[in-house]
Image: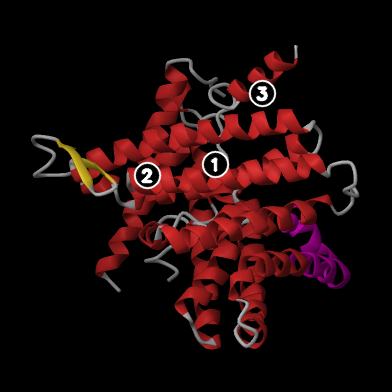
Amino acid sequence: MKTTSFWKEFTKGIVISNPLFVLVLGLCPALAVSTSVDNALGMSIGVTFVLLGSNIIISAIRKIIPNMVRIPIFIVIIATFVTIVNLVFHAYVPSLYESLGIYLPLIVVNCIILGRAEAFASKNPLLHSIADALGISIGFMLALLIISFLRETLGTGSLSIFGARLFTLPILGEHPMAIFVLPPGAFLLMGLLLALLRRLGVIKSE
Amino acid sequence: MALLNNFILAKFLGLCPFFGVSKKLSNALSMGVAVTLVMFIATVATWFINHYILIPFDVQYMSIVIYILVIASLVQIVEMAIKRTNLTLYNALGIYLPLITTNCAVLGITLINATEAYSLLESVVCSLGGGIGFTLVLIIMSGIRERLELADSPVSMKGLPVALLTAMLLGLTFFGFGGMI
């Protein structure tokens, strides 16, 4: 009984309520850092850590948070975890820290995290909140990887992960479609992906 | 800043209100004005905090927590001040003010000012330019979306996807300013 509901909360975040494609939350960091797969991975790891940490803490102390001031409390808890991520990235992966720039601290105002805190962690027991955080994070990571994979391969004609070049496309390698690494390309790709997923019936149309 | 490095189209800041509030022209204008106002006040406040508290005591690693608290309380104060002094403005901005706390554009501008080590004047100009650019794009977008509602688009493209494609075209257009300035 308990394991099935754990599993349900976990899988829910990956497809049925995927944060990027279905709920369309946290669009700002997602589109900004998806220029390369490296950045997307770094961003998803940061978001996973913050979401997991804040969901655990908020769920654990949910009974003693006064209802009136709950939002400021959530924000302070989230900001603390973001500070930790920020310092750790700065110390151990400085190149990633540089390329993520201000979008790393901006995880604080990522709607996904505050949204989960308000809608889920503040109402549900600890174990379910952990499952929820993990599911949502993996859904976010998958979506971000799809977007960044398409943007990097189409935009630069090749794919490299952590400096190691994996492959180069024959024609695109010489004449890459640079628009996809520029900001408008992100809007274009996101719009087409959303439309495609709706057409295939993966997510509901309006 | 307002045109070339537009916050929405080039830096992806404040996308949530951009797609959420850009369905009606009048709402877009109110939201834009409110964001610009809060961005301006937050810039001035965080500049003083950064230079007179965080840097002298060498606690800049606390900046994220401090900034978000300052912005949250500022939004509250601005809301109360507008409610007391100008009730019509309050009714117009009303529900949008609390939302600004979680708008990345506001936290973004304060972080940009801190990392670029701008002087007070530069920070203020940067925040005003960013705010005006934000308002401009929000108004253009809402004008287009009001018409899109009536257009006959494919079912799977309705709503958000077509809005994203519109944003792409707007972004390309704004890139054109790069050659002029």
- Quick check: A121 left or right of B2? right
Q: Would you say the magenta stretch is mainly helix, strand or loop?
A: helix
Distance CA(mark 1)–CA(mark 2): 23 Å
The residue sitting at the top extreme is A1
Residue located beneath label 1 in the image: B146
Q: Position of residue A73 (x, y in %)?
A: 79, 55
Closer mark to the observer between disc 3 and disc 2: 3
Q: Nearer the viewer, residue A118 or A84?
A: A84
* Identity, as a three-letter code, of the amino acid under mark 1: Glu
Name the residue located 82 percent from the left edge and 69 percent from the top edge: B86
In the picture of the structure, the residue carrying the numbered disc 2 is A186
Tell me where residue B108 sits by quadrant: bottom right
Q: How far separated are the C-alphas under marks 3 and 2?
A: 30 Å
Does the magenta run of residues contain A5? no
Q: Which residue is mark 3?
A: A9
Which element is circle 3 on?
helix
User: Residue A14 in the image: x percent, y percent?
Assistant: 54, 25
Q: Earlier in the sequence, mark 3 or mark 2?
A: 3
Residue B81 within the segment the image draws in magenta: yes
The three-letter code of the residue at mark 2 reads Ala
- The stretch of residues the image draws in magenta is B75-98
Q: Residues within 10 Å of mark 3 (few under 14, many from 20)?
A: many
Relative to B67, residue A129 above or below: above
